[in-house]
Image: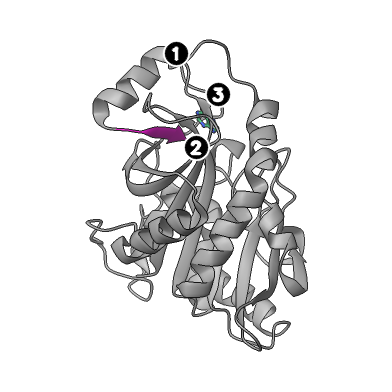
């Protein structure tokens, strides 16, 4: 019989635990073009996904595919231990939702209580500037498979989990405060998830807007749902790499999406550091 997701997560967590002496304070998932944050962690241990038992291997360009566990320097002589994913698993790559969200289950098994999910997204709200950031206040799940589908394992959480506050209000206020201290504009809005891998048609983007979406993307929502199933506190940040299809002139190109990540990398790293220090 194949292992349950619970056992898979325990096995992956045990693998990490035996190589990391300290307990991990928070986890971060770094979206397309945003992986550089992990390189700022000190005394880092790198875990290529291919080496973590049970983990699938990421296939998308720009996702290097490893977990980095390292230290974030705080005020003198204090540090926090952070686990940062450089690259994530997407449903559009062909993975099952259990595989897409196994890292979150692993974070749960490691006893991590705080999770920051980041992504590159298309701006549906016409007021959002290209290269700006959006704090995810809520989401709309239009992915075709629910990550919580199937027999519920009550060791993770309840059959019918509450989704009233997927994205922590407290975490959101903290993010807004940190952005303000940096003089950085931080939009707020609803992230609408589609499976991809194609970018949307203009008609689909108009639908997203009508439904209440401010940004569209192809990730994050399954991870957020699974994290909330385990009662982790979740914070979500989208980098608006482009106006979504039809919101502005021109077409959408993956290389431009990646380039935008590099362009805002410095500010993005600082925002993450500030949030993680105070959280
Ligand atoms: N749509 C969906 N996902 C995205 C986009 C987009 O326009 N830009 C970056 N990720």
Q: Earlier in the sequence, mark 3 or mark 2?
A: 3
State which tag comes first along the sequence, 1 or 2: 2
Of the two numbered discs 3 and 1 on the same chain, state the one appearing first in sequence. 3
- CA–CA distance between discs 3 and 2? 9 Å
> What label does residue 218 carry, if any?
2
Secondary structure beneath label 1? loop
- Residue 128: % across, % down: 42, 31
Q: Is mark 2 within 8 Å of ligand 1?
A: yes
Q: In which quarter of the image is residue 67?
A: bottom right
Query: Looking at the picture, how far across and down is residue 149, in whole percent?
Result: 35, 52
Sort mark 2 into few (<14), some (14-19) or many (20+) by Cα contacts within 10 Å: many
Cα distance in 3D space between marks 1 and 2: 18 Å
Residue to which mark 1 is pinned: 246
> Where residue 249 sits: x, y (%)?
51, 10
Residue at 55% in and 60% down: 272
Of residues 85 and 153, the one nearer the viewer is 85
Tell me: 201 left or right of 102: left
Q: Which residue is drawn at 47% across and 35% down?
A: 217
Residue 198's label in the rendered image is 3
Residue 118 is one of the magenta-drawn residues = no
Image quadrant containing the C terminus: bottom left
Q: Is residue 187 in view from this perspective?
A: yes
Q: In this view, does 9 lie above or below 201?
A: below
Give the answer, above or below, for where 133 lies relative to 147.
above
Tag 1 and tag 2, C-beta contact below 8 Å: no
Nearer the camera: disc 3 or disc 1: 1
């Amino acid at each position: 019989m194949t292992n349950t997701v619970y056992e898979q997560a325990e096995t992956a967590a045990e693998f990490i635990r035996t190589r990391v002496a300290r307990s991990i304070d928070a986890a971060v998932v770094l979206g397309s073009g945003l992986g550089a944050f992990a390189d700022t962690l000190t005394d880092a241990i790198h875990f290529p996904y291919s080496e973590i038992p049970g983990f699938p291997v990421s296939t998308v360009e720009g996702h290097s595919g490893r977990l980095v566990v390292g230290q974030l320097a705080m005020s003198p002589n204090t540090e926090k231990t952070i686990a940062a994913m450089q690259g994530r698993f997407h449903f559009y790559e062909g993975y099952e939702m259990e595989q897409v969200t196994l890292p979150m289950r692993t974070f749960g098994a490691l006893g991590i209580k705080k999770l920051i999910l980041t992504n590159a997204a298309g701006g549906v709200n016409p007021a959002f500037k290209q290269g700006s950031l959006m704090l995810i206040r809520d989401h709309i799940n239009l992915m075709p498979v629910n990550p919580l589908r199937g027999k519920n394992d009550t060791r993770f959480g309840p059959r019918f989990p509450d989704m009233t506050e997927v994205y922590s209000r407290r975490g959101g206020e903290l993010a807004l405060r940190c952005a303000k201290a940096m003089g950085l504009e931080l939009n707020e809005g609803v992230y609408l998830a589609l499976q991809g891998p194609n970018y949307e048609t203009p008609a689909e983007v108009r639908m997203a807007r009508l439904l209440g979406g401010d940004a569209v993307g192809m990730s994050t929502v399954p991870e957020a749902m699974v994290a909330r199933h385990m009662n982790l506190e979740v914070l979500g940040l989208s980098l608006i790499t482009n106006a979504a299809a039809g919101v502005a002139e021109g077409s959408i190109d993956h290389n431009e999406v990646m380039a935008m990540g590099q362009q805002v990398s410095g500010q993005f790293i600082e925002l993450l550091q500030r949030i993680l220090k105070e959280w």
